[in-house]
Amino acid sequence: MVLCTLIFAILAIFAIAKIYFKLTTGWCKSQTCLVGRTALITGANTGIGYETALDFAKRGARVILACRNKSKAEEARLKIISETGNENIVVKIVDMASFDSVRAFAKEINETENRLDILVNNAGILNYGDRTSQDGLPLLIQTNHFSGFLLTHLLLELLKKSAPSRIVNVSSLAAGLATKFDVNRIEKHVSDSDDYNNSKLCNIYFTQELAKKLKGTGVTVYSLHPGVIKTDITNNLTGLRKVAFAIMMNTMSKNPEEGAQTTIYCSVAKGIEKWNGELFAECKRIETYKTARDEGVAKKLWEKSERIVKL
Ligand SMILES: NC(=O)c1ccc[n+]([C@@H]2O[C@H](COP(=O)([O-])OP(=O)(O)OC[C@H]3O[C@@H](n4cnc5c(N)ncnc54)[C@H](OP(=O)(O)O)[C@@H]3O)[C@@H](O)[C@H]2O)c1
Ligand SMILES: *[C@@H]1O[C@H](CO)[C@@H](O)[C@H](O)[C@H]1NC(C)=O
Ligand SMILES: *[C@@H]1O[C@H](CO)[C@@H](O)[C@H](O)[C@H]1NC(C)=O
Ligand SMILES: *[C@@H]1O[C@H](CO)[C@@H](O)[C@H](O)[C@H]1NC(C)=O
Ligand SMILES: *[C@@H]1O[C@H](CO)[C@@H](O)[C@H](O)[C@H]1NC(C)=O
Ligand SMILES: *[C@H]1O[C@H](CO)[C@@H](O)[C@H](O)[C@H]1NC(C)=O
């Protein structure tokens, strides 16, 4: 009897949480048309990135799916074309775990595309153990921060040429939990969980500093936290973290379409330029996390990242 009541209570809490999250999900209502515009999304073959690409395709954009796996990306491309009728969808291969790959990719985009109106830095991983990349950095930090930093720099000229244009950086709630972030040690592995949180804090700091540097160019930049979304990102977890995330993902989480709304909002909503450099959630600007308020750290992270990616 007691057990039944307990189980019922737990289920009720999950149900209430789910309803709460459904009701508070922000939807991007912008009607912005993207005909004649080009958008590039990293990690666009699945999850939030796929839904973002699908939305841009519906708006008529030329959409570049920047992915590491050709067969997965081709499959996504065909799905988007069949769902939207927009045939202007292209696949370009980039591995965000390798600076060489990012450089080669950016070079090709710069040489072959006439314009770039929207860059969405979305690709990210949650768990890769303590693996080191071929560039000698923790794989997670490189994928989630340094490669996006490098890619954004290499595409800036094209973005400026296409102004008004936007850069959108998909961060996470986890950035707010990065209380032990040490900018002097960002290139060092701590633990999967710390590395993820730190990398997502880097996304926010990078956005702030970039916004300052881009003042007056017509290029604006935003970071956001998408919420908790059921995607492939937790596939690789093990042990307790797997169980914890599975419970979270299967109870209170959003679906990828819901999860993509704030990314879409930051990419297309009119009149948000006054919030250049700021953080968004549920299609609204929010106060940035306490962990992300040190301008000195933002500046230092920038300088350090420049050195590490060899700009
Ligand atoms: N899901 C959530 O609850 C949540 C919450 C907060 C923030 N986010 C952020 O949202 C973003 C998208 O995540 P998601 O949940 O949509 O995850 P996902 O379904 O796992 O998608 C991640 C995408 O990134 C790609 N990717 C990973 N490593 C890459 C690499 N080295 N080179 C190129 N592409 C790579 C993946 O490609 P493959 O398919 O080839 O692996 C995939 O397309 C991430 O930045 C994540 O941190 C997610
Ligand atoms: C790409 O994805 C497919 C389908 O999931 C998989 O079979 C293949 O091994 C992947 N290729 C690479 C190079 O990772
Ligand atoms: C991009 O291409 C232009 C010419 O199309 C060239 O002048 C410029 O140096 C290139 N920039 C980068 C970063 O490769
Ligand atoms: C999962 O993590 C292991 C290392 O822990 C790595 O070898 C593997 O490539 C990862 N796979 C995915 C899909 O993230
Ligand atoms: C990182 O963030 C997650 C939530 O995404 C949290 O559960 C975890 O405790 C944080 N890790 C650390 C080391 O603070
Ligand atoms: C922006 O966010 C994306 C996705 O999390 C990440 O891959 C990229 O490195 C970030 N860019 C910077 C410069 O932090």
Image (cartoon, rainbow, N blue to C red):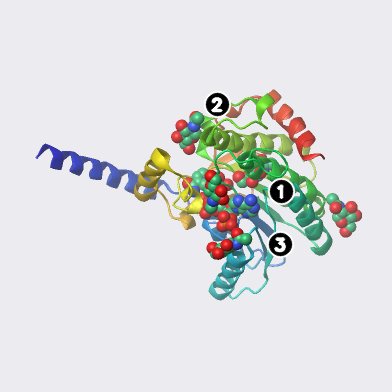
Residue of label 3: 38
Q: CA distance from mark 3 to mark 2?
A: 35 Å
Q: Which SS class for mark 2? A: helix
Q: Tag 3: residue type?
A: Thr
Query: What number is the disc on residue 98?
Result: 1
Ligand 5 has an atom within 8 Å of the beta carbon of the residue at disc 2 = no
For the question of whether residue 240 can be seen, the reply is yes
Image coordinates for residue 222, horizontal then vertical, percent = 64, 43
Residue contact at pointers 2 and 1, CB within 8 angstroms? no
Q: Nearer the viewer, residue 98 or 15?
A: 98
Mark 3 or mark 2, earlier in chain? 3
Q: Disc 2 vs disc 1: which is toward the camera?
A: 1
Image coordinates for residue 221, horizontal then vertical, percent = 68, 44
Residue contact at pointers 3 and 2, CB within 8 angstroms? no
Disc 3 crowd rating (10 Å Cα; few below 14, some 14-19, many 20+) is many
Residue of label 2: 290
Q: Nearer the viewer, residue 84 or 133?
A: 133
Q: CA distance from mark 2 to mark 1?
A: 31 Å
Ligand 1 has an atom within 8 Å of the beta carbon of the residue at disc 1 = yes
